[in-house]
Image: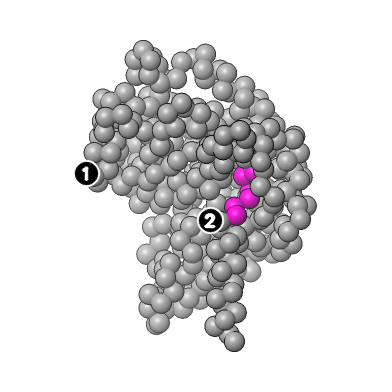
Amino acid sequence: MARPVWIDTSGATARHLGRGRGMTDARVRALRLRARGARDEVAKAAAAGALPHERLRQRLSGGETAVDRVAAALPAGPLAVVGEPSALRAHRVLVAAEPGLRWVDAPLDHDPGLPVVEVPGPAWATAAPVATAALPADTLAGLASAPGAPETETIEDMDGRFGVFSPLSLALLRRSGQDLEPVHALLDELSVACRAPSTDPALGLATWLLACALEDDAPELAIIGGGVRGRAFARWAAGALAAITKGKIEGPLVRSVGLAPRVVRPGDESQLGWLTAPGRVPWLLTVEPGVDGALDPLLASHRALQHEVAGPVIRLRMRNGGPASLAAAAWLVLEAALTVAVQLGLSPLAMDEADRFHGLRSEAQSDSKA
């Protein structure tokens, strides 16, 4: 399989950053073994039908698909897409540069003259929170039949983590004139590759995200995207990584674990100050769609400043800024995040705060109809 996405971790190694900084080869090897064990659990969950992005992929092929039905129902011309912010960020990943769409996270703000499509989120799969650091091998797989798990097949469409692959997201992409076949084909290839240890493209990213999550001083993960598509991807990735990996482990001392991602807008001087603040060196993840993203001068400046303060840099690089490459990168981010969550002893598909928000939203809608 040709590499539509790859990571460059040379800027996060001890060889590059100097003694006492960055990751040594021995540390990388040890974490890779830990990540591989967690990858096996993610594979079991996929086989059991517990992973929303896998279910979405399967609904995108064969006969009249959900994308066909949604695309046929969309009005022509300019369109307002209204929804909860994290769901909108997911739906913007593949169509960030489409001029005919207006994204509105406050329904009263939309132009009443525009047709409206609502992304009715958030609504996440629920499961009992995990209270121990050790997970049984079938924890993820068990979520598919967990008490209270939604029965509707469309629940993941509205999820801010997995909505990148929803029928609405791809229908909007088709509406912009894009061919979806390369996206479908690449996702199918990735699904197979991610389940085979010898070809797993998500293992490398999972290893380095796990390294960041396990650092003693719990550094933040700064995410910077190059260009319109890179910035849209960075905004979604920060939310998805936090939602999947952030949680609390119960024990003699309750402690928070997981990644703490923060989006940085290239060129923002206040963010530059944060990056270079003494004692507050984060890890930096740059999102670089194609040659333009890699050569973005602001991104290059941030990488250089990060290296000056001996901060690790991971580059998520894509062959181009097309939807197939973006979809592949999103798939690998989700796979890596789930792997980190499993290794940390978290239940990555349970989001109690989001469920409570959804309950309040449903109550408000009921009151308005009374």
Between disc 1 and disc 2, whose residue precedes?
A: 2
Residue 291 visible at all: no
Instruction: Choose top left, top right, bottom left or bottom right for residue 253.
Output: top right
Residue 34: x %, y % from top left: 62, 25
How dense is the environment of label 2, judged by Cα within 10 Å: few (below 14), some, or many (20 and up)? many
Residue 147: x %, y % from top left: 76, 55
**SS for dot 1:** helix
* Left or right of 4, for residue 103: left
Residue that sits furthest to the left in the current view: 269
- Identity of the residue drawn at 38% across and 75% down: 109
Q: Nearer the viewer, residue 272 or 296?
A: 272
Q: How is the image coloured?
A: one colour
Residue 160: assigned label: 2
Q: Quadrant of the C terminus?
A: bottom right
Residue 277 visible at all: yes
Q: Main secondary structure of the magenta part?
A: loop
What residue does disc 1 label? 269
Q: Which residues are magenta?
A: 347-352
- Identity of the residue drawn at 47% across and 30% down: 212
Labels 1 & 2 near each other (Cβ < 8 A): no
**SS for dot 2:** loop
Residue 182 among magenta residues: no
Q: Amino acid at mark 2?
A: Gly
Residue 324: x %, y % from top left: 52, 47
From what the image shows, is residue 261 above or below residue 88? above
Q: Amino acid at mark 1?
A: Glu
Instruction: Compute the Cα span from label 1 to label 2.
Output: 29 Å
Q: Nearer the viewer, residue 131 or 85?
A: 131
